[in-house]
Image: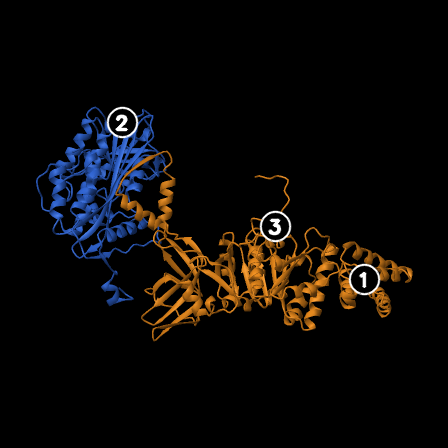
Chain colours: A orange, B blue
Amino acid sequence: MFRKIGDEVILIYNPRTENVEVGQNISILDEGYNRGLVVQIIEQSLVDLAGILEDIIRTESIGEIMVKEFVSPDYEKYRLDVQNMKFARAKIRKEIHIEGGDQKVTDWTGWVPDRSAKVSSAKDEWLMEKLGTNPEKFKYPIKVGKAAYSDNEFAASAFHLQGITVIVGKKGSGKSHIAKCILLGLIDHKAQGIVFDINDEYSAMRFNPDESESDYNSKLASLNPGTNMRFTLPYIGAYVFFDVMQTTMGLGEPSAFALRNKWVELENNGKLSFANLKDSAQTLSGKISGAITRRLERMHNTGLFTDQEDEATTLESHLNAFDQGGALIINLKMKDKDTVDLVVQTILRKVQQLLEQGRKPLFIFAEEAHMYLRETDWADAVTRMRHLGTYQLYMTNTPTQIRSLAIRQTDNLFLFHLTETSDFLHITPATRIDPETIEQVSKALPPRTCLLVGEITNHYPWIIKTLPLSVKTAGETRRFFEKP
Amino acid sequence: MSEEEILKNFVGILEDHFPDANTFLARDVELDKFVYVNDEELDKKDEHYEDEEIECNDDVVKTAIQELERDTTIIPISAVDASSARLGETNRGVISAVRLAVWKQEPDSKPTLCQYGPYLAHITPDNIDFIYNYFRCEVFGMKKGKPPRIMKMTDRLRNFFERLGQRRASSIISNGITLWDGSLRGATVDTPLDLLRDSVEKAHLNHNTVIGISKYSTLRTASGEKLLDMFGGQARSCIIDVNDKVSKKLIDQIVGRVHVVRFTPDGFSFRVDVSPCSDTICTDALKLLKGNCLFHNGYPDPLRQVHVHAYFTPNELLSLQNLAIEKYQMKVLRSFDVKRHLLAPYG
């Protein structure tokens, strides 16, 4: 251990004999004091020495000279060792206290060990045990990947997913994969979910890679708005309908009032249907009638509403079918904005209604939620709906689009590779760790590897690699050119 | 055995005579400073003064200063330099490293630079006699001699190594100039006059002129003026032959003629000793050197290159210390400066 600066220590190591990676956990034990530190590598670099600069300049400035060296081959190895010495910048995460031979891990008090303290790689199992995140003690473990440096399987407890989970990373970094992994894990524990799937990539999990039916075939229902996902007005109800009409479709208050009267009238007569509502609206005065009719026409065009009971569906009917766990995949791929907005609003309001009626909690997976959630929806989602039992997972490659309110309420963060400083700054409040860790680690993350921090890890950042799933996961993108 | 074979096999000779040691107290290496390490400059600090304190008369300054012109006739050039560094102390003696660089530039071919070493030597009371007399007797054919103190032996080893390298540099070209670092003075504490004469003669046998260039010189007139400052007002390449002004006693120990030369108008002045081969005049040899070399602040680039490739950098010292520790399995002692402990913060 070379130096301590603030909450960081600088470790010098020989890369020929020590393998150090960003995200790796290191234990620094000062046996004389029965104390130690747990630190985590956030950056690696070459040791910058004046003599090395001189060596490099000497080598590079030789130019046209042919140099012949007569030297012991052993020397070259040692010379390169010194020239390639590295340092690792590590954040102090925890403090170790040894009492009666038993090691306890507590929050750091500011104490630092001597330079002579023993530095070694901290085993994942040991650290998980000390942090209380040992998967063997979880009642509802979900395998989300494997620890990046030990290759041990890493499991999250489904219990800790009952809040807001944010999964961010660049396109293709693996964020959808881990969301699918979590979804299947939740289903395994008999939980129910709804997925807003804007790329139609979740329904593929109903099949295995060889196209045979997967174990989740009957537990994943793919709903296509306008095709096998249509609702009747009585099912939707006035609350949801007018909420959508006013907020999503932008219907003014006077028009909404007039339409509501028509709705009540039809409902009282037992004649509430989309067609009847549309006809009634046309009896209203010209300006109001026009405003309402145009919006009803847009609604009609989405195909989401039907007056035929046999064409209609209900969320309850699908969810009831998933008593042993399952998820509704709402396919929003290639749907126009009206349809997406209507579908999402309708489902969110309906889910809220169901939860208020005492239905058991469920998990909502929202891919690129900023494309269909309004400001009020974010506020509603992270406050009221969460308390009602709607646990949310947001997946996005544009983290700055997630509202600050949601970021601050985040319980778990899966952070894949990112490069933009604005992204790091935006998501840092989602964690209880320093911004440097977020920025340094995220920049160094290879594909399918993420930093995980939150309730799942007892707020200790872990680097994990995603695990391959047994089911088909890839979405299909139409291509003009088939090969690079 | 040829000089080349001795130089290449030197590592084996030192390894065969590398006594075991239990502990190693490594020299402190400052890794954060831009420095070249050559302990010769430390070890010979006193000797430098003694070596080059030459009494000159005042009338030297009145001697005509000649302009040094460039002769562009292409000739081969060779150059040589060696460096040494103490790596640390063992419970038995001192571990040192030496390295030699030899430059060769010939018409129509790329310059070649051969680095011999670094070679590690463990000098102890048990092997100091062997190492010292190996060079004296086996390499240079001299009589057996009494080795110096262990602390001085690192520089003696470097000196032997450099003298051997000078012979090598003189043998790899012919009809050219071989550049040596330092004066051509023998009969010093480390270089017998016969050894130096023999080396220069070997160079002459190959029709080579030997030019020794001293980076440091204390040449002064009787009134105390530094001779190297005498070109101060001249914005041109200059040369003065001061050989006849040097005292008889000293001139007998110098194998060549002593000059003060400024090779480039904007460069430094150096003491330059020239030992020309039979049919060459010193001034002509210097003109040829000026016409065949690049100069860096007035210093010949071949000599600069051999310095750069022979000297050690701090990280190289650290590498060599590590090599020694692991190869010879020594326990490392933490450096301890008793003076610092007793007198801090004033020590």
User: Marks 2 and 1, Cα distance to the nearest angstrom?
Assistant: 103 Å
Nearer mark to the viewer, of 2 and 1? 1
Q: Tag count in the figure?
A: 3
User: For residue B284, which numbered disc appears in the image?
Assistant: 2
Q: Is residue A127 visible?
A: yes
User: Marks 3 and 2, Cα distance to the nearest angstrom?
Assistant: 83 Å
Badge 2: residue crowd in 10 Å (few <14, some 14–19, many ≥20): some
Question: B297 or A155, which is in the foreground?
Answer: A155
Chain ID at mark 3: A
Q: Secondary structure at mark 2?
A: helix
* Figure quadrant of the C terminus of chain B: bottom left
| Amino acid type at image mark 3 | Gly
Q: Residue under circle 3? A: A475
Q: Residue under circle 1? A: A251
Chain ID at mark 1: A
Q: Secondary structure at mark 3?
A: loop
